[in-house]
Image (spheres, rainbow, N blue to C red):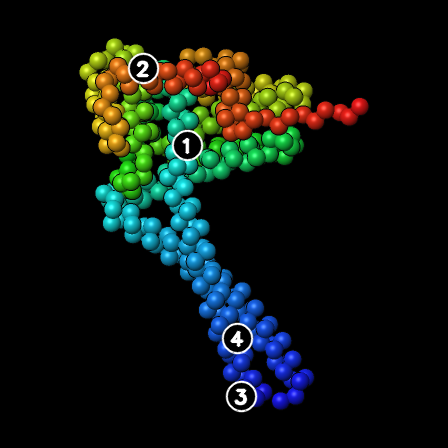
């Protein structure tokens, strides 16, 4: 093999490896970053479904326990990634917790949950609604869900 | 340089180039995956306020939730194929039963139980369609026992069927049955 051939082959190897590595690195990094960002939206779905079903069909104790599992998970998610946009879901979960407390005639617990609901709603740029407005809005949204068969 | 050797050189160089791009992309992908995960974890450490132990626990719960979601996604994705769907349903049930008994899944045991209950109802409906009344009844009883333990007021067959159908419909409308051609 001549020197020129060796140089050509080595050049082809070097350029090929560099181009391949750069493309592979870029594509994988972008894909995994997209996937990890998407997880923040998709991961709580199982918990949201679970807590909604328990809220709708279970007794107040089980409903509250389920909503607290969701709330703890979403708060951990917020602590892990402060801009993970879970504020709306947290506000909704806290309003449901307040409604469960209302059903068990526990006004103190209900207002404590509503305090947290307002905090999360305002933290993500929402308006400062009254407790009754927030509860009414959620009840209306739940009624719409029920009309779709849920 | 003669014309012949140049053609051979070029072909060999091109082959080396193509193979190198392939090998390079594999190496790059591996490095890229590790880098992306490292960067994500570092970002969480810098921005987040969870301790290392809390982060580890959170990630464990996350992976268990992903397992539940994945098992359910297979069931949804195979709704058009009755036989395959039944296999995926049985796979979902066995996966959820395993997860239920795993020590680290205790915290989300209720979550697993709700999904397992719904899977039992789906399996019961599938068996009923195949006229396996005994199996269908067995699955329904398992579902009812789970939902009773989960504090449901109404765990009648009708309610459970209604809830399971609604959950499946949220995942995507039921595929239309093909009309026989006249």
C-alpha span from label 2 to label 4: 69 Å
Residue B57 location, x and y as percent? 32, 41
Q: Mark 2 falls within which chain?
A: A
Mark 4 or mark 3: which comes first in sequence? 3
For disc 3, the marked residue is A3
Residue pointed to by mark 2: A136
Residue shown at 27% from the left, 13% from the top: A102
Q: Name the image quarter holding the N terminus of chain A.
A: bottom right
> Does residue B155 appear left or right of residue B82 in this picture?
left
Residue name at image x 54 percent, y 86 percent: A4
Choose top left, top right, bottom left or bottom right for residue A82. Answer: top left
Q: CA distance from mark 4 to mark 1?
A: 49 Å
Q: Quadrant of residue A83?
A: top left
**Helix or strand or loop: what does disc 2 sit on?**
helix
Q: Earlier along the polypeptide chain: callout 3 or callout 2?
A: 3
Q: Nearer the viewer, mark 1 or mark 3?
A: 3
Kindly identify the residue that appears in the image at 32 percent across and 39 percent down: A84
Say yes or no: labels 2 and 4 on the same chain: yes
């Amino acid at each position: 093999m001549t020197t020129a051939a060796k140089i050509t082959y080595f050049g082809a190897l070097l350029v090929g490896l560099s181009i391949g590595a750069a493309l592979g690195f870029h594509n994988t990094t972008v894909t995994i970053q997209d996937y990890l960002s998407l997880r923040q939206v998709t991961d709580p779905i199982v918990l949201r479904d679970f807590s909604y079903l328990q809220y709708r069909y279970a007794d107040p104790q089980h409903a509250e326990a389920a909503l607290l599992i969701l709330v703890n998970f979403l708060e951990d998610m917020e602590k892990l990634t402060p801009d993970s946009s879970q504020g709306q879901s947290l506000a909704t979960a806290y309003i449901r917790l307040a409604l469960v407390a209302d059903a068990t005639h526990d006004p103190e617990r209900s207002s404590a949950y509503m305090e947290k609901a307002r905090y999360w709603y305002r933290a993500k740029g929402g308006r400062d609604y009254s407790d009754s407005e927030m509860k009414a809005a959620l009840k209306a949204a739940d009624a719409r869900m029920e009309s779709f068969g849920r | 340089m003669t014309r012949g050797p140049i053609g051979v050189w070029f072909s060999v160089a091109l082959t080396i180039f193509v193979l190198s791009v392939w090998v390079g992309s594999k190496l790059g992908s591996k490095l890229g995956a590790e880098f992306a995960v490292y960067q994500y974890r570092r970002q969480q450490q810098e921005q987040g306020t969870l301790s290392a132990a809390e982060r580890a626990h959170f990630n464990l719960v996350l992976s268990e939730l992903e397992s539940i979601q994945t098992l359910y996604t297979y069931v949804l994705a195979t709704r058009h194929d009755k036989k395959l769907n039944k296999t995926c349903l049985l796979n979902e049930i066995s996966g959820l039963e395993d997860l239920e008994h795993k020590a680290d899944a205790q915290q989300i045991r209720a979550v697993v139980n709700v999904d397992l209950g719904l899977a039992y109802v789906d399996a019961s409906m599938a068996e009923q369609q195949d006229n396996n009344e005994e199996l269908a009844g067995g699955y329904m009883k398992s579902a009812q026992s789970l939902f009773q333990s989960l504090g449901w007021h109404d765990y009648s067959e009708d309610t459970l069927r209604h809830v399971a159908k609604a959950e499946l419909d949220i995942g995507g409308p039921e595929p239309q049955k093909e009309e026989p051609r006249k």
